């Protein structure tokens, strides 16, 4: 497995988990006296202060894991499975106190093959949970893909079901503010949900992290807007011979969809276009024929997007930039030798984005794999390999610039092993150091604590919060 694939699919799991098909009810908050699981952590965290919770129903081969953080509320949302359905539980990140639990809810009937086949490398599709901050308010969204209305007489309708809750709810049997069923057509594991633009975006199909078609969902009203290849989302074409086709929506924002074309060019239709916000050292087109725009969105996070651009000349490193999503305004740029075959610029436009965009809690830093930016100092930090040091893929960033990541290391069995690294983004790549036998936090700071995930003492998936020192 490539290092990027490890970051993308095992970001929440520090190591493999032992599969378990049993169901578990939400544990009572009174069980805080139970000893903490022993963890080896970075020096910034106190392994003896915090709380743990186990979700024993999560299978080893799960493609996603049912835990999400609400940073503004300082809360962690967890999804439990029980005989009468699934239940959300929201805990205070600092104390572990249970703030509220939802009434049980039933997901749509899973599609055939949803359980996956670990022997064939097929992941299991399970219900999930996400947090979206829309118009200054945080919501918890439980979601599941399946067939609505399937029974002995009916085939059912395929949907992605969303159940929307206010993060500041109270009670022990909270009902959702609304239920929204988004019609989709996809095989198990091919439906994606992201909240990176301030609206929920549901995408489905075979096009990696940002598939098409897609639909934007306003969780406050329940309104859904579907986007497909027939919609009027096209951006300006470089000339009359260009098709400007193969469009995908990368994020749903309050100002409309952020659109990226596989042949180059991106923006929000009617608002701004990438050619007007190009960084220095890049040309408008990627070839002398003028058929394709330069520039493509790599990913979105924290109200910003990271884009890759072809640089002029033969065998030159690409230019990477960060922009405000709603305005397109350029905030920083740099050259960085992140392999184009794994990126999004001209050499391989159809490739799946290997790395998610990760953002520090306060929004001062963001990164996608080895491409990182300091938004306060308006500069980039390139962590791609330099011929001696290996590439570092960032997985989480603290507000002080301390970032944690992973490198790929060949083992004696010709497999891969995760090597956790720590790097000070204010000092640059030379500050990187390996942390032997240490877990990296998935979220670095939520109410003064870090979130860590991995197996408990029985091999079941657990979520751990540990206080900062």
Image: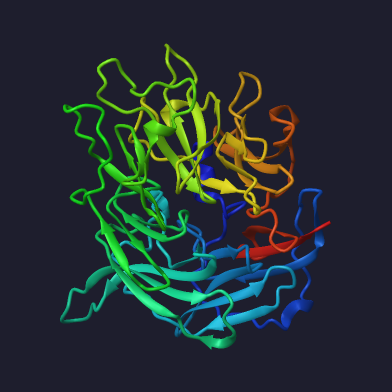
> With 289 as the anchor, is 345 left or right in this view?
right
The quadrant in which residue 409 appears is: top right
Residue placed most toward the observer, 431 or 271: 271
In the image, what residue occupies the spot 64% across and 49% down? Answer: 360
In the image, what residue occupies the spot 60% across and 37% down? Answer: 373
In this rendering, the answer to whether 307 lies above or below 444 is: above
In the image, what residue occupies the spot 61% across and 51% down? Answer: 15
Task: From the top left corner, tell me how far across and down residue 209 is, in percent.
Answer: 40, 47
Residue placed most toward the observer, 468 or 436: 468
Residue placed most toward the observer, 411 or 355: 355
In this rendering, the answer to whether 317 lies above or below 200 is: above
In this rendering, the answer to whether 464 lies above or below 305 is: below
Q: Which quadrant is home to the C terminus?
A: bottom right
Task: From the top left corner, tell me how far across and down residue 120 is, in percent.
Answer: 38, 49
In this rendering, the answer to whether 184 lies above or below 173 is: above
> With 182 as the anchor, is 336 left or right in this view?
right
The quadrant in which residue 76 appears is: bottom right
Task: From the top left corner, tell me how far across and down residue 414 is, in percent.
Answer: 55, 32
> With 144 as the anchor, is 17 left or right in this view?
right
The image's colour scheme reads: rainbow
């Amino acid at each position: 497995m490539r290092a990027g694939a490890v970051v993308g699919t095992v970001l929440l799991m520090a190591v493999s988990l032992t599969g378990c098909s049993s169901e578990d009810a939400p544990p009572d908050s009174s069980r805080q006296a139970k000893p903490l699981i022993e963890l080896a952590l970075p020096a910034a965290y106190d392994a003896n202060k915090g709380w743990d919770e186990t979700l024993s129903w999560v299978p080893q081969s799960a493609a996603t894991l049912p835990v999400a953080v609400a940073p503004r509320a300082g809360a962690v949302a967890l999804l439990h499975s029980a005989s009468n359905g699934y239940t959300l539980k929201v805990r205070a990140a600092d104390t572990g106190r249970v703030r509220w639990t939802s009434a049980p809810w039933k997901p749509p009937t899973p599609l055939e093959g949803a359980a996956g086949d670990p022997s064939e490398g097929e992941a299991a599709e399970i219900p999930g949970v996400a947090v979206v901050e829309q118009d200054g308010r945080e919501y918890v969204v439980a979601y599941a893909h399946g067939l609505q209305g399937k029974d002995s007489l009916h085939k059912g309708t395929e949907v992605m079901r969303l159940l929307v809750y206010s993060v500041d709810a109270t009670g022990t049997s909270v009902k959702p503010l609304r239920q929204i069923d988004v019609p989709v057509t996809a095989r198990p594991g091919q439906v994606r949900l992201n909240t990176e633009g301030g609206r929920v975006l549901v995408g489905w199909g075979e096009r990696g992290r940002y598939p098409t078609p897609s639909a934007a969902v306003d969780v406050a009203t329940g309104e859904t807007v579907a986007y497909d290849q027939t919609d009027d989302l096209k951006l300006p074409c470089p000339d009359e011979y260009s098709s400007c086709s193969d469009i995908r929506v990368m994020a749903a924002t309050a100002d409309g969809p952020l659109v990226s074309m596989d042949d180059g060019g991106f923006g929000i239709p009617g608002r701004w276009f990438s050619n007007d916000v190009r960084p220095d050292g890049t040309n408008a087109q990627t070839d002398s024929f003028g058929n394709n725009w330069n520039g493509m969105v790599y990913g979105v996070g924290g109200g910003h997007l990271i884009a890759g651009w072809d640089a002029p000349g033969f065998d030159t490193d690409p230019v990477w930039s960060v922009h405000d999503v709603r305005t397109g305004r350029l905030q920083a740029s740099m050259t960085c030798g992140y392999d184009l075959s794994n990126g999004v610029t001209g050499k391989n436009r159809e490739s799946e984005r290997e790395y998610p965009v990760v953002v520090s809690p306060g929004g001062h830093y963001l990164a996608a794999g080895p491409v990182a930016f300091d938004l306060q100092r308006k500069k980039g930090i390139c962590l791609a390999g330099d011929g001696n040091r290996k590439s570092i893929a960032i997985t989480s960033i603290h507000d002080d610039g301390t970032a944690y990541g992973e490198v790929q290391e060949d083992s004696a069995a010709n497999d891969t092993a995760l090597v956790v690294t720590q790097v000070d983004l204010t000092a640059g790549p030379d500050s990187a150091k390996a942390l032997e036998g240490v877990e990296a936090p998935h979220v670095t700071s939520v109410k003064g604590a870090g979130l860590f995930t991995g197996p408990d003492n029985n091999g079941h998936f657990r979520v751990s919060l540990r206080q900062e020192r």
